Image (cartoon, rainbow, N blue to C red):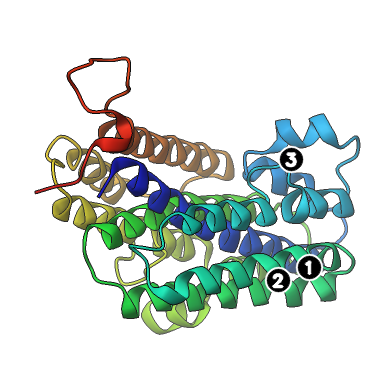
Amino acid sequence: MLARAAENLYWMARYLERAENTARLINSTTHVLLDLPHGASFGWANLVEIAGLDSLFKKNYPQADEQAIMRFLIEDTDNPSSILSCVQYARENTRTLREVLPAEMWERINSLYLYVRENAAIACRSRRDRYMVLNNIIEQRHAIIGLVSGTMAHDIAYQIIKLGRNVERADMTTRILDLNSAVQFPEDSVLHETLMERVWMSTLNSLSAYQTYRRLVSMRVRRSDVIKFLLHDMRFPRSVEHCLSEIENCLRVLPRSNQLIHIPTQLRHDLAQRSTENLSVAELHLYLDRLQADFGVVHTALTQHYFHAYSDGDNPDKKSQTEIEFTK
């Protein structure tokens, strides 16, 4: 496989995962805000900050109200991480990869793009419409992943897709966790404990993890248990540790990975050794920020080692980026 094709596969997977998780992030925020009492410290501005898009948002929008933030995150093509932008980029990458993807893949992703393009403005109109549209996006994304897993040869191209999906998924799981951990209620509220439980239930629901948590961990939803579950539980495919394990497994299959595999292995080891039992809100935020920076290191290493290992001007005797092949 050519390095350029591998990079397109990697980013196709990341864009689709980002579109789905942005939809999950928005739904999670909506659920939390519906339950907040007077005096709670949380708002829509927290959403773009957790997503790491606050600087770009402030350049284009004078006010951080719900409608502006929804336009920015769902339909604004000037935002490369909006749902519409991500699906559009995934569609463009897929269009050049038909020879290595299942025949129906292009049709499914093109259909998703057309749906998002036609319904993005509707999703920004009301919370009810938004919930319906975002859930449909998540469901269509699941159908695409099911098609990949069930019909695609589990070769190098498939491993590249898994790699991109799990790098993005690990990052977004920490962001969803960070978002809801930032909610603060007045300590003197008689409903403080109940409200906190609702927030963490929302966190689990946003990752389709609530029933799994109750079956594997506890019927009671507690902050420390939820954080541990979403960071460490290898049985849940959206936990950070599980994603890192999947990245390791992909690298074991890929050629020339000896120089890379120690990065996710060390990160997973450090994660397993770190206790989050008694972390304050500020300490948890800093820890999740460091994890996100570590995922950036993983991404940079992959990019430099596989996708941009050479450029035309580096050495005339070496192949260009578009000619480097993934061969055993």
Farthest left residue? 328
Marking on residue 242? none
> Residue 98 lies in what quarter of the image?
bottom left
Q: Position of residue 260 (x, y in %)?
A: 20, 38
Marking on residue 78? 3
Instruction: Classify 80 as above or below 239.
Output: above
Q: Which amino acid does the dot numbered 1 rest on?
A: Glu
Closer to the camera in the image, 210 or 249: 249
Q: Residue at position x 59%, y 59% from top?
A: 19
- N-terminal of the pair, mark 1 or mark 3, is 3
> Residue 35 lies in what quarter of the image?
bottom right
Q: Which class describes the residues within 10 Å of circle 3: few (<14), some (14-19), or many (20+)?
A: few
Closer to the camera in the image, 122 or 229: 122
Contact between labelled residues 3 and 1, with CB atoms less than 8 Å apart: no
Disc 1 from disc 3: Cα separation: 17 Å
Closer to the camera in the image, 284 or 99: 99
Q: Position of residue 223 (x, y in %)?
A: 53, 62
Is label 3 in a helix, a strand or a loop?
A: loop
Side of 125 where 231 appears, left or right: left
Is label 1 in a helix, a strand or a loop?
A: helix
Q: Position of residue 308 (x, y in %)?
A: 33, 30
Side of 96 where 189 appears, left or right: right
From this viewpoint, is residue 193 visible?
yes
Disc 1 from disc 2: Cα separation: 5 Å
Q: Which class describes the residues within 10 Å of circle 1: few (<14), some (14-19), or many (20+)?
A: few
Q: Residue at position x 74%, y 56% from top?
A: 74
Q: Which amino acid does the dot numbered 3 rest on?
A: Asp
Marking on residue 115? 2
Contact between labelled residues 2 and 1, with CB atoms less than 8 Å apart: yes
Marking on residue 118? 1
